Image (cartoon, rainbow, N blue to C red):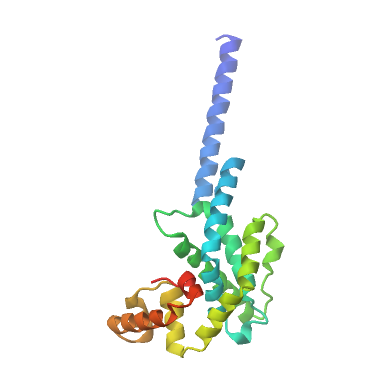
Amino acid sequence: MSQCHRASDARTSKERFSEAENRDVNSRARAVGVCSLQSPMEAARADLQFETLFPEVAPALYAWASLRVRASLRSRLDPEDLLQEIGFRAWRGFSGFDPSIATFRSWVFGIAHRVLQEALRSVSRGAAVSNPSELLRDFPASATTVSRRVARDEAIRSFLARIEQLNEEDRRLVLWRGIEGLSHAQVAELLAVTADAAAKRWQRLREELACDETARAVLVG
């Protein structure tokens, strides 16, 4: 065999090994929901798409966090910090979002529930809840701005104040049906009523809130 032929075989073997290694890395990355081999252009496109989607759900996420965190915990668990952490994790895992399986809103609310559970566990242990600003070095500046703007939005604060004035059952309806998007059947089970009763109560409450522009932006169903 000629030296040239041997060199060609060696290069071919090296290329095969490299391709196999890349396939293995890609496989492991997909297994943990991380796209570690994105090109800069693909990453920039993903950032742009995230920056379009996140502002649409940020008001609902902030309202949800504000209703989920009891007033007695606000000194240690700030809804704005939760919103920042939810946004950061959604951005970091955005390559794993599949619009054919779920809407962006339902996907990011899944993340929100996990973030809140972790934060509440930290608070119950007396541990400090990590400040998301420590991890936001690469987080798109526009997404950070959205979180801050939403937390300071007077219309959202006014909406939340109005929800706080509702009775306990209506607040739960807003949270479970209006923000989390649970079905009437799921809400009925939580409230220990029939699905028809839950639907009628939600329809009545929806009509009461219809004139509130923030409610129209935040609530679903």
Q: Nearer the viewer, residue 219 or 24?
A: 219
**Residue 193: horizontal and vertical position, in percent?**
32, 86
207 vs 31, left or right, is left
In this figure, what is the number of numbered marks?
0
**Quadrant in which the C terminus is drawn:** bottom left
**Residue 103: horizontal and vertical position, in percent?**
43, 60
79 vs 110, left or right, is right
167 vs 127, left or right, is left
Which residue occupies the extreme front position in the image?
A: 211
Q: Nearer the viewer, residue 107 or 130?
A: 107
* Residue at (34% x, 87% y) in the render: 192
Can residue 39 be seen in this snapshot? no
Can residue 192 be seen in this snapshot? yes
* Residue at (39% x, 73% y) in the render: 182
**Residue 33: horizontal and vertical position, in percent?**
51, 53
* Residue at (68% x, 60% y) in the render: 136
Which quarter of the figure has residue 9?
top right
Which residue occupies the extreme top position in the image?
A: 2
Above or below, 128 against 103 in this view is below
99 vs 14, left or right, is left
Above or below, 75 against 35 in this view is below
**Residue 96: horizontal and vertical position, in percent?**
50, 53
Q: Nearer the viewer, residue 130 or 162?
A: 162
**Quadrant in which the N terminus is drawn:** top right
Q: Nearer the viewer, residue 65 or 37?
A: 65
* Residue at (44% x, 53% y) in the render: 98
